[in-house]
Image: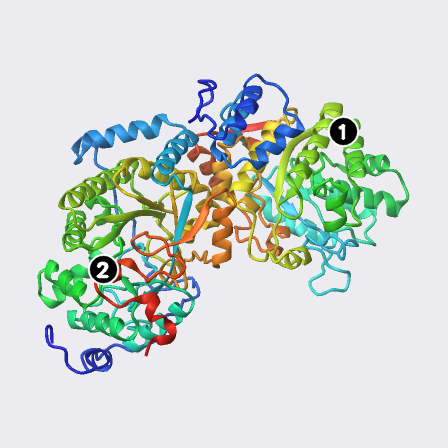
Amino acid sequence: MVNGRPAEPAVRAARGPALPILSTVAPRRREPTPEGSAGFRTKTPRPVYEPAPVASRPYADQIAEWLEVLETTPLLELGARADAVRRERHPEGIVTYIVDRNINYTNLCVTDCRFCAFYRRPKDDEAYVLSYEEIGRKIDEAKELGAVQILIQGGHNPYLPLDWYLGLLRYIKEHHPIHVHGFSASEIDLIARVSKRPFHEVLRELHEAGLDSMPGAGAEILVDAVRDFIAPKKIDASYWFEIHEAAHEIGLLTSATMMYGVGESWADRIEHLVKLRASQQRSLERGKGRYTAFIAWSFQPLHTEMQDWDIPLGTGMDYLRVTALSRLVLDNFDNLQVSYVTQGPKMAQIALRFGANDFGSLMIEENVVSAAGTDFIMPEAEMRRLITDPGFQPARRYQDYTLVREGDDGCPCCQRHGKASLAAAGAGRDA
Amino acid sequence: MSVTISEELRVQPTDPRLIPIAERVLAGERLDREAGITLFESNDLLAIGALADLVNRRKNGDRVFFVANQHINPTNVCILRATCVFCSFARRPKEEGAYTMTLDEVFAEADQIRETPVREFHIVGGLHPKLRLQYYEDLIRGLKERHPGVEIKALTAVEIAHLARIEKISIEDVLLRLRAAGLDSIPGGGAEVFSAGVRSTIAARKLAAEEWLQVHRTAHRLGIPSNCTMLYGHVETYADRVDHLLMLRELQDETGGFLTYIPLAYHPDNNELGARLGRQGTATTGFDDLKNLAIGRLFLDNIPHIKTHWVMNTPKVSQIALHFGVDDLEGTVVRERIYHDAGATTPQGLTFSEIVRLIKDAGKRPVERDALYREVREW
């Protein structure tokens, strides 16, 4: 079934007997209970984490240099330096955002990340997989509202084979054409393992079936010692980079993220940034795909296994320093997104003076962070007010950061891939 | 593009209109009305913040003051229910949700703090048509008896003027009786925006500007210190804001009785004004919050402290504000009602250790204070 395309493969795969234990339920949130929403609020003692000395780290010199900058530069001066870089890269003063919908096709996951409130174990009666039709319906609703892409991500569900993903992508492109930004590196790894195929072949097949770009999720902190502390079963840092660079190799654009405030040190945060910069450098030299943007946010503890751990959560200072520092370190990244969903509209707006030039996505649906108790969803008028108020010009964009223009032909990268023309197709003309 | 004005200023203005203002601030000169309006118009947030930070450092160094306090709102019944259209807290006497606490209920609420080191009660409420001065005297006296170490900051100028009216006695007599009962200072609420035009739109029947100032002038003359505020982010213009600050600065020149200035962010949920303006769900922006704090620091050169109220600004923005000229952080609060009725999504209280950590994490020195800004201890 990999190369051949039987009639209605998609629909059959979704309904078919390949997924016997899965029920299809709408995602819902649990109210907090004394035991914890996911029932796993065991009194797991916090694992010990000792950050490694700077000298023993890769890129030690660069890390030491940036640590020095951080320690000697007052907050507003750091912001002003980042703001100057932003002005240089985006002198027109435009702050972009994308209209999209997060579709979480499954919450079933076997990776047990301690920071996650979204996933359910295989036997949990709240575990779900969405059917192709449900996903199609969500896409149509989103397009009706002006979405130009879907972000499709899910748990690490070992019951879904590669064919399920290929079928889904073909189904979307055939019946509900839209830019598909999907499947983070750790999902790619799981699909490869479940299907016993090399990950770069998985990437290529997904791309051919309709995957247009790849989100930067699953990065957390790209330092193995931290990953062992918060997500011991997740792919290690070098593998995350390998998958992203392989995606770039076949021409895909990806993004990069960081989730801080999980007990890591500043050296860990900087190592993460410096490694990303090096990875981008390699991809730029190859001249195909690249990272389009960097997005940082702080760990949201509610309902997670880590909620009772004695770790300092990300403060306002942390957010602005991470934002400004990332703008300075990542001098080969074009765009820096704010995270209003986790930081709130006030902090997100302030971050526009600390190096950020993109408001991220105007999400029509979001489930993951909301499951952890953070829920700043806003209407478009409010997002535009937040951008306009400090003197910036708001503009809708596509995934590749070209601006949406009145009467344009839809997502330019999908056009280039010879895929469905989105704006031309329009919601009304979809079957 | 930026010009280096002084090495002391770590962020040089990118907005050229700020250069002459920066020069005046560096020289320690007072800012005029025009400069105030220019500051509000400018989007050069970091330069404004750095200027305010410099002024604050000259006054307060690295110290950030906070008080372990508890807010108590004895009643939400208010005769201005219909005319203060920005308020989500007030109720008519028989309206659903209206409450008036008995003295025992007030004492019970205050008793929650027995195990924590609270040093200040912040007591404000509606203008109840029937609660007499005696109730407030008994309330203050009762709290003082039960919590002798705790200072009492109670009743805004609007409530004091209301009590004078229903008792048919002077403002001075109300203040003297309250002080005899144990009042230590008075809060800065009810100032809103002094402009008569704005007041007629958002608080038509509330105490006029001159009367509000007169209550504070009287308190200061009697040796009762007070705070001052401005409610921003509704229908006021930048000129209205600056005129408001000018009036506060003028009274402070005269009396020196203001301890701290607190800009208050208007919250549009569950009130008539928010509905009229179509503003539900849209708080003031982070830029505006920081600018109001920083410009307050730059303009009010004679008021010792500038306070950020984390209930409305959020704890994250309040922490950042410590680099924008702010040296005073609202305290533990315990249970905030007024802004939460207006849609605030922040916590209703912060713990003592959370406040200490926020300040330390900002690179500042936390100083626990009492209601009169005397140092209790440094953390």
Instruction: Tell me the residue at 75%/56% (across/down).
Output: B81
Coordinates of residue A198 in the picture (x, y in percent): 8, 60
| Quarter of the rendering containing residue B78 | bottom right
Relative to residue B5, is residue B227 depicted above or below? below
Residue indicated by mark 1? B220
Q: Nearer the viewer, residue A344 or A226?
A: A344
Q: Tell me the kind of residue under disc 2.
A: Arg
Q: Tell me the kind of residue under disc 1.
A: His
How are the colours assigned in the image?
Answer: rainbow
- In screen coordinates, is B160 left or right of A345? right
In the displayed image of the protein, which residue is found farthest to the right? B168
SS for tag 2? Answer: helix
Instruction: Tell me the residue at 39%/35% (across/down).
Output: A83
Chain of the residue under label 2: A
Relative to residue A149, is residue A290 depicted above or below? above
| Number of the label disc, if any, that sits on residue A416 | 2
Coordinates of residue A406 in the picture (x, y in percent): 41, 59
User: Which quadrant of the figure contains the N terminus of chain B?
Assistant: top left
- In screen coordinates, is B139 left or right of A180? right
| Number of the label disc, if any, that sits on residue A34 | none
Q: Are marks 2 and 1 on the same chain?
A: no
